[in-house]
């Protein structure tokens, strides 16, 4: 029985009788133990604790158990199908976890490589070798605005003066 301490040699011969007694208690809660087992339980607190824990665990399992429908209870292959489905699901999870681990390790390796490359470029002082193109405007042709050599007027008085003094009168 897994509850028992394996180092205690005195308890080892009582493992099988204790398990049999637990099965008997499931059928009849008032079933008395073997006289040898009863004497051992009276003297051994470890085995008494293991018996109490096993009884508590069994009662929890019975309380949480779902009833099996009658149609499935009569089916002799129901347990085999459920076991096969459990094995199948366990196989799928066993396949998924290594794939996830492999993917995450690859992603980690790529990101670390990229970070090391950026750090090396930053430390080495490498800068851009080409300058980005800058939009440049042509200088305005003043002759298109005013054919004379005079600059274009800035305020309304200058406009009136320029018109009056212009050769063409415009």
Image (cartoon, rainbow, N blue to C red):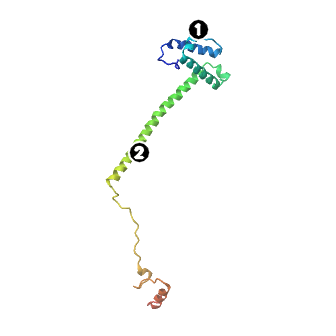
Q: Residues within 10 Å of mark 2 (few under 14, many from 20)?
A: few
Q: Residue 132 in the image: state x and y as whole percent.
A: 38, 62
Q: 113 or 73: nearer the eye?
A: 113
Q: Tell me how far mark 2 sits from mark 1, CA to CA.
A: 69 Å
Judged left or right of residue 76, residue 126 is left
Task: Decide: is 58 above or below 132.
Answer: above
Quick check: 68 left or right of 120?
right
Residue picked out by circle 1: 35
Considering only order in the chain, which callout, 1 or 2, is on the residue closer to the N terminus? 1
What is the residue that sits farthest to the left in this orientation?
A: 124
Label disc, if present, on residue 111 of the rendered structure: 2
Residue at the extreme front: 43
Q: Badge 1: how crowded within 10 Å, few (<14), some, or many (20+)?
A: few
The residue sitting at 59% across, 16% down in the picture is 22
User: In this rendering, which labeled residue sits more in front, label 2 or label 1?
Assistant: 1
Q: Quadrant of residue 79?
A: top right
| Foreground of the two, 53 or 165 | 53
Q: Which mark is residue 19?
A: none
Decide: marks 2, 1 in contact (CB < 8 A)? no
Give the structural element (helix, strand or loop) at label 1: helix
Residue 128 against residue 72 in the figure, above or below: below
* Number of marks in picture: 2
Name which residue lies at 39% across and 65% down. Answer: 134
Residue 20 quadrant: top right
- Secondary structure, mark 2, is helix
Residue 170: x and y, percent? 48, 87
Measured from the top left, where is residue 38 in percent x and y? 58, 11
- The residue that appears at 36% across and 61% down in the rendered structure is 131
Q: Relative to 54, does residue 140 appear above or below in the rendering?
A: below
The spot of residue 33 in percent (x, y) is 60, 11
Q: Is residue 128 left or right of residue 63?
A: left
Report the front residue among 47 and 28.
Answer: 47
């Amino acid at each position: 029985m897994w509850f028992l301490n394996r180092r205690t040699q005195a308890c080892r011969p009582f493992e099988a009788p204790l398990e049999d007694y637990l099965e008997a208690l499931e059928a009849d809660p008032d079933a008395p133990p073997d006289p040898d087992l009863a004497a051992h339980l009276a003297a051994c607190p470890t085995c008494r604790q293991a018996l109490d824990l096993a009884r508590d665990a069994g009662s929890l399992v019975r309380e949480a158990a779902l009833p099996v429908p009658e149609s499935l209870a009569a089916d002799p292959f129901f347990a085999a199908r459920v076991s096969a489905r459990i094995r199948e699901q366990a196989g799928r999870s066993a396949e998924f976890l290594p794939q996830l681990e492999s993917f995450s390790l690859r992603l980690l390796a790529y990101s670390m490589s990229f970070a090391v490359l950026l750090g090396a470029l930053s430390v080495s002082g490498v800068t851009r070798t080409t300058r980005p193109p800058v939009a440049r405007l042509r200088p305005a042709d003043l002759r298109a605005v005013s054919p004379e050599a005079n600059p274009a007027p800035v305020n309304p008085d200058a406009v009136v003066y320029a018109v009056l003094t212009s050769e063409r009168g415009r």
